[in-house]
Image (cartoon, grey):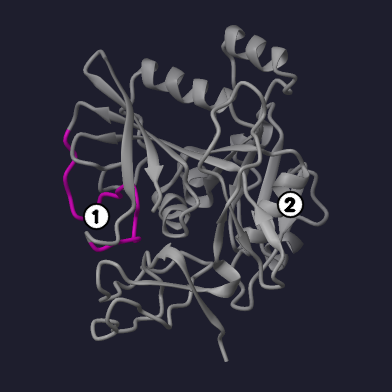
Amino acid sequence: MLTLELGPLRVLGWHLGLDCSQAGPIAIGCVSSDDGMEALKTLRCPPRAWAVCRCRLPVLSNAPLRPGFPTGGRMSELDESGAQVLRPHITVVLAMSADGKIADYTGAPARFGSPGDRHHLETQIAQADATLFGANTLRAYGTTLPITDPALLAQRRDRGQPPQPIHMVCSRSGQLDPRLRFFQQPVPRWLVTTPPGAAQWSTSAAFDRVLASSTSTGAIAWPTVWTMLRSQGVERLVAMGGGTVVGLLLAHDWVDEVWLTLCPLLLGGAAAPTLLAHTQFTEQLAPRLRLHSVRSHNDEVFLHYHVVRP
C-alpha cells in the first residue's frame, strides 16, 4: 500500500488520473511520475488541494551556494529510503518565438535567436557547473555550446572552475548516434540514463561519465541523479531543453530560475513544440513566476524569472 503524507506541495499534475473534485480542501492519492515522457493527465482538484507521496516530500534547504552566486530556491526531497536528497540549483534557459514556440512545426532545430541571444546563453552556461539537455535536442542540433568568450573563460578561472562545464545529455534508452559532432567537441560529456541505456556505452569512451539509475518502472531516477551530481560538486545546473526535459523539471518543482528570450517572429502551428512540450497544468496549479529583470536588445526581449513557491 502506498503511504501518503500531507505536505506543502501543490499537486502539479501526476499521471494517476484521479478525480479529486469531491475531496474537499485536501486531495489524497496522487503518485508522482519519474518519467515525464508521457503527457501528464490533469487532476480535477480544488485550487488549494495538497498531497504528496512520502518519498517525494520536498524540504527547503538553507545550505549556502558557492560564494558569488545567488542563494535560495534549491530544494531537497526524501528518496524512497527516506534519506534527504539535495539537488543542484536549476536554471532553465530557452529562446522562443513571440507566440511561445521553441521550434517550428517541422521539428527542425531552432536557429531564430540572434548572436546576442547566443552570447546570453553562453553567459548563463559559464556560470554553471553542468548543463542538461534531452536526447531529442542533441539529435536535432548535433552539438552543444562550448564557452569561447575569453572574458567568460577568465571568470570561470577566477572562480576556480574548469574552462568548460559538464555537458550532460539525458536519455532513458541511451540510444544516441556516436557520429554526432557533439562527441568531438572539447567539453566534458556525461550521459544520464538507465542501466539498460548505460550498457550500450560500457565499452565506449565517448562519455567521460555515465550516471545510470532507474525507478521501478524503468524510468530515470532523478533524485538519485541529483545525489550523484552533488557528490561530484555540481551545485548549479543549466537546463537547455527541450520541452520534455523542461516540463519534467517544472512538474516536479525542480526549477529555481527561468531565462526566456522572446524572439521577434511568429511560428504558429499546433504541432510546433512549446516550452513545456506535453506537460500541462490547470490555471490553479500552474507554476508561478516572479519577474526579476527585463532587458531588450535588437528586437529581442530577455526575461528573467524566479520560480515562486508556496
Query: Which residue is at the front of the view, 261 or 14?
Result: 14
Helix, strand or loop at mark 2:
helix
Q: Residue visible at 77% across and 42% down? A: 232
Q: Which quadrant holds residue 98?
A: top left
How packed mark 2 is, by other alpha carbons closer than 10 Å (few <14, some 14-19, many 20 or more), is some
Q: Position of residue 264 (x, y in %)?
A: 20, 26
Q: Residue visible at 46% across and 57% down? A: 248
Q: Residue visible at 45% across and 17% down? A: 119
Identify the amino acid type marked 2. Met
Specify the segment rendered in magenta.
Answer: 266-282
> Is residue 4 shown in magenta?
no
* 290 w.r.t. 154: above or below: below
Report the side of 179 relative to 25 (left or right). right
Query: Which residue is at the front of the view, 50 or 213?
Result: 50
Report the side of 5 relative to 186 (left or right). left
Which residue does the numbered mark 1 point to in the structure image? 271
How packed mark 1 is, by other alpha carbons closer than 10 Å (few <14, some 14-19, many 20 or more), is few
Of the 4 image quadrants, the one containing the N terminus is bottom right
* 209 w.r.t. 53: above or below: above
Q: Residue visible at 33% across and 71% down? A: 49
- Counting residues from the start of the chain, the first of labels 2 and 1 encountered is 2
Helix, strand or loop at mark 1:
loop
Outermost residue on the bottom side: it is: 1
Mark toward the viewer: 2 or 1: 2
> Is residue 271 shown in magenta?
yes
Q: Position of residue 216 (x, y in %)?
A: 63, 78
Which residue does the numbered mark 2 point to in the structure image? 228
